[in-house]
Image (cartoon, helix red, strand yellow):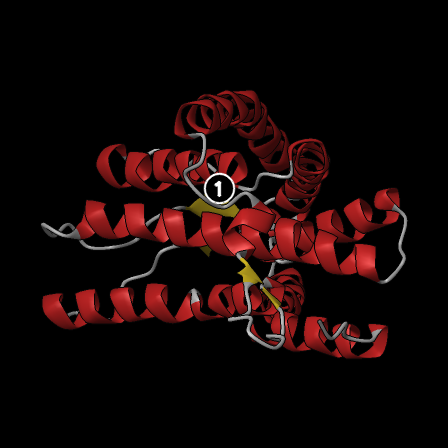
Amino acid sequence: MLVPSRRRLRLEVWIVLGLSLGQSAVYSVVQLLDKMTRAPLAEGTSTLNRSQSTREYFDLTYQLLDIIFALVPVLLVLYFLTDQRQAGPGDAGNSRSAFQKLGFNFARPGKDLLQGMGLAALIGIPSLGLYAAGRALGITTAIIPSALDAYWWTVPVLILSAIRHAVLEEVIVVGYLLDRFGKFGWSMPLAIAVSSLLRGSYHLYQGFGPFIGNAVMGVLFAWLYTRTRRVMPLVIAHALLDVVAFVGFSLFGKAVGLG
């Protein structure tokens, strides 16, 4: 089996991040600066799920296309993480599934679900408190989890959007990056710190409160991953948090700052 050099792996990581959450982090910093230079941050707003057309089925089409194409970098990292082994004489060859390597499968559905629900409960209430504190301190924008019009497909699309965010962030920021940082020879604390700061940075457009909250969440999630080597409970927890925020706001109009 050919082992990629560290230089090649670094280039690979930059490409993945440039196509996904690294790009989001750059835009987030620019958006934060834009908001801060227009008015006090507390007067700004951050909308997470926007309507993209006044025409119902075009809006639905745009929403689904956004979800689908946002997941392409996940397919890319799953490809990169699959160990391709060259076949020898009389050997058909084999490969180790990236799903197995990341624990991104249904090998233990009950345990993963319980852990995911526990994590969501552990993070959800403090996140609301941090949002309220950030608003009071003027370091967090008003967060609008959903601005979609009320159609028959609104709730299903918001659920798909929540799953999209969960899969994209946990597979790339935790599973993929910790694997690659380890191959760079980085210590685990350094790898967790960089992963967590990246998670916080692409939430900066919401203000400094969400940056801090998501960075802390990133430390917890990354640490748990190093203990279990399973990304599925993290995906479940993240998806549950976002479903509650997106769908709850859409149905009841309460601004909760998760995601």
Q: Is residue 207 above or below residue 74?
A: above
- In the rendered structure, the answer to whether residue 65 lies left or right of residue 71 reads left
The answer to whether residue 40 shows anywhere in this view is no
Name the quadrant containing residue 95.
Answer: bottom right
Name the quadrant containing residue 62.
Answer: bottom left
Query: x and y percent of residue 73 in the render?
Result: 51, 69
Looking at the image, how many numbered discs can be counted on the residues? 1
Say which residue appears at 81% left-offset and 54% top-offset. Answer: 182
- Camera-side residue of 78 and 222: 78
Q: Secondary structure at mark 1?
A: helix
Query: In the rendered image, which residue does mark 1 sit on?
Result: 235
- In the rendered structure, the answer to whether residue 140 lies left or right of residue 146 reads right
Query: x and y percent of residue 135 in the render?
Result: 58, 36
- In the rendered structure, the answer to whether residue 183 lies left or right of residue 83 reads right
- In the rendered structure, the answer to whether residue 105 lies left or right of residue 130 reads left
Circle 1 packing at 10 Å, graded few (<14), some (14-19), many (20+), is many
Say which residue appears at 39% left-offset and 46% top-offset. Answer: 145
Name the quadrant containing residue 52.
Answer: bottom left
Quadrant where the N terminus lies? Answer: bottom right
The answer to whether residue 94 shows anywhere in this view is yes
Q: Is residue 250 above or below residue 205?
A: above
Say which residue appears at 67% left-offset and 47% top-offset. Answer: 211
Say which residue appears at 43% left-offset and 64% top-offset. Answer: 71
Q: Is residue 159 above or below residue 252?
A: below
Amino acid, disc 1? Val
Q: Is residue 168 above or below residue 254?
A: below
Query: x and y percent of residue 109 in the render?
Result: 40, 30
Query: x and y percent of residue 131 in the render?
Result: 57, 34
- Camera-side residue of 208 and 17: 17
